[in-house]
Image (cartoon, rainbow, N blue to C red):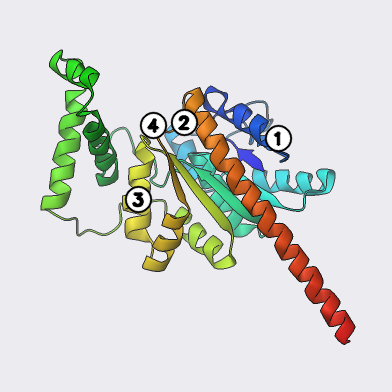
Amino acid sequence: MLLLSAGLRSRSGPHELYVRLASALCDAGHDVLRLDCRGVGDSQGQLPEGSLLEIDHAVDRGLFVDDVRAAMDAAVQECGAKRIVLSGLCAGATTALLTAAVDERVQALLLMGIATLMTPDPAEKEGLTEGVANIYIDGYRRKLFRAESWRRFLSLRSNYRALGSALYRWVRSRAVPRRDGLDPRLNMRAVEALQQCAQRGVRMLFVFGEADMELGNFQVEFVGRALDSELQRRVNETLVVVPDADHTFTGQASVERLGRTVRAWLDTEAEEASEAVIAMEDAARSRALTA
């Protein structure tokens, strides 16, 4: 497994998520490479000139794809890797998906908190998307029966602006259904890459934290509006939501839940790969005997 830079973060990941996840996977018998792409962390090379927003958009369009393919070359040539899984968090998941679409050596994808909308320009006043509003409202529903939440609300410590915006967007989306099609910030390269990977039979697992705002965008804008019904079904069957986790799986409990989910999935992948190899070898022996 190659763990890819979460945007411009180093190979340690947020609060050393990649370090902890890689350690758990190695203990379970998997080989893991945590990768710093060019100009990130300890890697040489330079990022393109431009603002952070422009660089973020370049990453979402595939800036690091060649770096990942070079790392795959090294994994194959120097380590003898025969089966490659790409993974990443947020923009790292986007990079993994874009790479798999153009490199058939990728046999499986673990996509954590994948970002499906391009980062908005700070000057733009986009407001909350429908998907993010849904996540906010679901979170507030869960807090209705918590005494601490009511204490925060009554003591003026709650984020009333966020609550008001979420309620407004949630009600508006139901009262006035949107008719303008896809969100203009939707990463269409990611949509096309997913379609190509699905056609090729790449195995995928999508993992989000329950409180991850990207989950709402993924479900509403990406899956709900950009994919056909068959692909929607296939993606939803491979979606796992980790309870009480945020976008970066902060906290020991969230990391442990994530680790158990990933290990179980990788074990299933390895078992199915072995069965496929045995079936191919049996078929080859049968052809040889027939000849």
**The C terminus lies in quadrant:** bottom right
SS at badge 4: loop
Identified at 40% across, 36% down, the residue is 243
Q: Position of residue 141 (x, y in %)?
A: 22, 35
For mark 1, what is the residue? 26
> Amino acid type of disc 1?
Cys
Residues marked 1 and 4 touching at CB (< 8 Å): no
Q: Badge 1: how crowded within 10 Å, few (<14), some, or many (20+)?
A: few
Label 4 environment density (alpha carbons within 10 Å; few <14, some 14–19, many ≥20): some
Q: Which mark is residue 219?
A: 3
Image position, residue 125 (x, y; %): 23, 37
The reply to whether residue 216 is in sight is yes
Q: Is residue 113 above or below residue 101?
A: above
Which residue carries the number 2 mark? 248
Q: What's under tag 4, amino acid-wise? A: Asp
Question: Which badge, 2 or 1, is on the more N-terminal residue?
Answer: 1
Callout in the foreground (1, 3): 1
Q: Earlier in the sequence, mark 3 or mark 2?
A: 3
